Image (cartoon, rainbow, N blue to C red):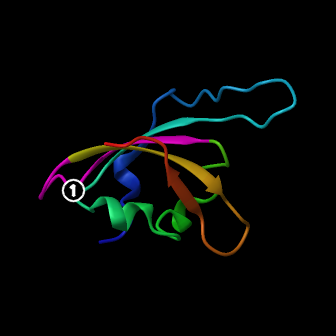
Amino acid sequence: MAFEPRSFRSKSAGVALATSGARSARDWRYITNDDHATVAAAGYFNNHRAHVGVGDYVYASVDLDGTPQARIYMFNSVPASGNVTVVQVNNS
């Protein structure tokens, strides 16, 4: 399955948190029937690269039509071209 933009929402109602000298970071919520391996694969979020940045977190409910799991991902690469990548930051 492909990334579902209607299921991807900012948890902070459009307000990004920032620290001195760093880019703003956002928390996102994502719900999908895709499994963890699919969501964590390089390129899964490519179509949403204009909205995310390195350091943003995604609180995800994955594989809802199979074995549901909660996962937390962090965007670790959001290049202008090429694959957007995430890394899992929890052990669920």
Viewer-side residue, 51 vs 82: 82
Q: Write the residue at 73% across / 26% down.
A: 18
Residue 33 part of the magenta segment: no
Front in this rendered view, residue 8 or 27 = 27
Could you tell whether 79 is left or right of 59 in the image? right
Q: Is residue 65 magenta?
A: yes
Q: What residue type is disc 1 on?
A: Asp
> Viewed as shown, does residue 10 lie left or right of 30?
right
Identify the residue shown where x is 67% and y is 48%: 54
Residue range highlighted in magenta: 56-68
**Residue 81, quarter of picture:** bottom right
Front position in the image: 5 or 91: 91
Image position of 46 (left or right of 67): right
> Badge 1: how crowded within 10 Å, few (<14), some, or many (20+)?
some
Q: Residue at x 22, y 58 (%)?
A: 33
Check the image and report above or below for 51 versus 70. Answer: below
Q: Which residue is mark 1?
A: 63
Residue 61 on image: x %, y %: 28, 45
| 80 to 61, vertically: above or below | below
